[in-house]
Amino acid sequence: MTQVMTASTQKQLRQGRIRRGVRSILRHLVLTVLAVIWLVPIVWLVATSFSGYRGINITTFFPASYTLDNYTNVLFHPDSVAQFPRWFANTFVVACFNCVISTCFVLMVAYAFSCCRFKSRRLLQNLSVTVNLFPGVLAMIAVYFVLRYLNLTNSYAGLIMVYAGSSGLGYLICKGFFDTVPASLREAAKLDGASEARIFLQVVIPMSRPILVYTIINSFMMPWTDFVMAKMILNSGISSDWTVAIGLYNMLSRTLVNNYFALFCAGGVLVSIPISVLFVIMQKFYVEGITSGADKG
Amino acid sequence: MAELAYAAPLRTDGKEPNFLQKFGHAVAHGDIFTKLSFFIWGLGYIGHGQLIKAVLVTLVQGLGLYYLGVAGIPNLMKFGTLGTVQMEMVFNPATLKNEVNDYDNSFAILLLSVIAIVVILALLASAMAVVTSNYQLQRIRQAGRKTNTFGQDIRVYLNEKFYVTLLTLPVLGVVIFTIVPLFILIAVAFTNYDQQHMPPNALFTWVGLTNFFTLFGGGQSLSLTFGYAFGKVLIWTLVWAFFATFTTFFGGVFLAMFINDKRTKLPKLWRTLFIITIAVPQFVTLLLVRNFFSDNGIFNTMMANLGVTGLLRDAGLIGANMEYIPFLTNASWAQVMIILINIWVGVPYQMLIATGVLMNIPGDMLEAARIDGANPVQMFFAIKLPYLLSVQGPALVTDFVKNINNFNVIYLLTQDVYVTTDQAMAASSAKEVDLLVTWLFRLTQEQYNYKMAAVIGIMVFIICAVFTVVCFRFINKKEATFS
């Protein structure tokens, strides 16, 4: 081949290689710029969490001095404003209860709509879609009144009820997954004499590990990331009762922000760590869930 | 399954009779036990030899009737007026003290009445179901067969009727925590429940459609501002939902294609860099970004040092005597910034999803297009985009609805930061950057104006419902033409 190659073709090849090289550099440069834009706030969060200055640093991006004090303060020296360990424990309790109840509800509804055949199935499904169209905030305001009437505001029972109560409505993604479990499997189990309940618990659920993990993590994460409902239900102003989200939000109120911004960042980082770990586990199922749910409408 | 054969065979066209027809037939042809079971559920089952079931259903019925007797009916009687006795201090001669009188609480009346209506409907429907099932039992016995024992009944609920077992609790949860509250709020839209009419100290009552007229700018002079604010907030809500949905969708698609391109090295690393932003909870990043862009925040300092602030001042984009760029404190700036920040928040999610969807495009389709000489742009518009839209079309519709109701981004970015200068907006507690949902939330939290919040909530529902129905019609039609 090289013998046949003339000088001009060699030149063309070299030009092509250069053009490709330039394009490749450009492409990666664009990606780098984008990545920097996306990471700036995160870097700022982490950098400020190690800052020696407790307020907002408005002169330089990176803090002037670094210290671990913010983390030790947040974890081991709670004061009247920042009671991170309490908040963490509160949120953990709520998250565990919500996780169990919500996961059961979602799996049950999804299985009923996906695998059982009954007359009011379509009607119930359409109803659930309609109910979902009402803004959640609106229902929440009404729920707040009901809870206040029942004396359940400022209690974790009330908060768990609000989180888990209508969780059955979020069955779509899970149903999309159950739809892909071959019907022949269920039929075979039925021929072997298994009841519907056994098929659900011993055939379909073990086959749906991904969506099980997705549902569990999703419902566990909800109290950590939710802000509005917690703010509404736990409104007593007693900071030891709060969840992480309200506590951190409160640190940024106008009177406190200049003393607690670095602590806020440290707390934010601490909350992010478990969530990141869970998210990395969930990432794979996340896409699967969305796309399989989307097909069905 | 054998029981089905004993259901009323009354339709000549061979179709299964519906619930009402079955009930009618059961009443017409039932024996005394079947008929009586409408009033006392247990009687029928006792008559047909199912004792445990009889006790259980009678207990449930008793509970329902007990609620109606103690709280339901008394409150339902006052439902027409929502109470007439205002809370007062009265002198009690027996204790020689001033005591609170036996006042009416309008909200309690409304709440307990709505629950009573739900209970009455449930009791009626159950009574009809009980009669129908008793008629089946009666026919089984008439045919000389045995009715199910309690154990057998339980087995039915783990088998043919397993869906009942599965759905009961979740449906109950949805009814209690979503549907009943929604009914209450819909009812509140037709009352004058606001700061001047707050139970338990004051009563509120029905006012018909007045609140709806107020929202559209009718009525007295004060309410004129509501019509004005509603128009402005509605337009911004729709603009926001449109941009928020499409910028993040296309941003995500382009980023995904860019990273997945064969010529990009280390695609996994790039993807991870963007995904890191999802791992930090939204409320943390949003609150952080809000301080990042605040009037005397770090970004403004950087802009001033770089001379951008001066440049913008000269260009007339910010006021002549401004020392900072009002990223989140000026209406137009804030609206643009919110959409930009939302791109930052939403694109990584959409990229993740788009990556998954794009990988599912059949490779031979792209290969064929390449052999036919299609360039990348043609391939995007002719293959990739239609494919993405067909898979994600429904998700886009739900995203749009979710963005109309996107409380977090707007509230966390603007609450306590953005102050409106428009008096007419301020009078109705609205801001230029408010969505309908954040507006209604603040109406309840700051002005205790529940009646208007409820009306706005109903409007949001109507907008979302119309949009969803129209879009799904369109999507279904399209799908039909494709396949």
Image (cartoon, coloured by chain):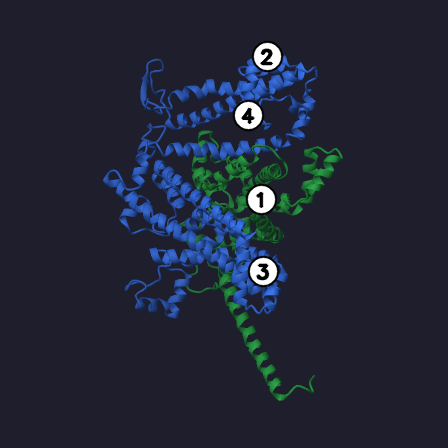
Q: Amino acid at mark 4?
A: Phe
Element type at mark 2: loop
Q: Which residue is mark 1?
A: A220
Parent chain of label 1: A
Q: Tag 3: Cα neighbours inside 10 Å, few (<14), some, or many (≥20)?
A: few
Q: In the image, what residue occupies the spot 50% across and 32% down?
A: B175
Label whose residue precedes the other's in the sequence (4 or 3): 4
Question: Do the residues at discs 3 and 2 belong to one chain?
Answer: yes
**Residue type, mark 2 in image:** Asp
Q: Determine if marks 2 and 1 fall on one subunit.
A: no
From the image, state whether disc 2 or disc 1 is nearer to you: 2
Residue B68 picture location, percent across and down: 47, 20
Q: x, y percentage for residue B316?
A: 30, 65
Q: Amino acid at mark 3?
A: Thr
* Label 4 element class: helix
Provide the secondary structure element on which disc 3 rests.
helix
Numbered mark located on residue B31 in the image: 2
Which is nearer the eye, A252 or A138? A138
Residue located beneath label 3 in the image: B272
Location of residue B43 in the rendering, given as x and y in whole percent from the top left corner: 59, 13
Marks 4 and 2 share the same chain = yes
Check the image and name the residue furthest to the top: B32
Residue A138 placement (x, y as % from top left): 43, 39
Pick whichever of labels 3 and 2 is earlier in the sequence. Answer: 2
Q: Are marks 3 and 1 in contact (CB under 8 Å)?
A: no
Report the chain holding disc 3: B
Above or below: residue B195 compared with residue B297: above
Chain assignment, label 4: B
According to the picture, the residue beneath numbered tag 4 turns out to be B19
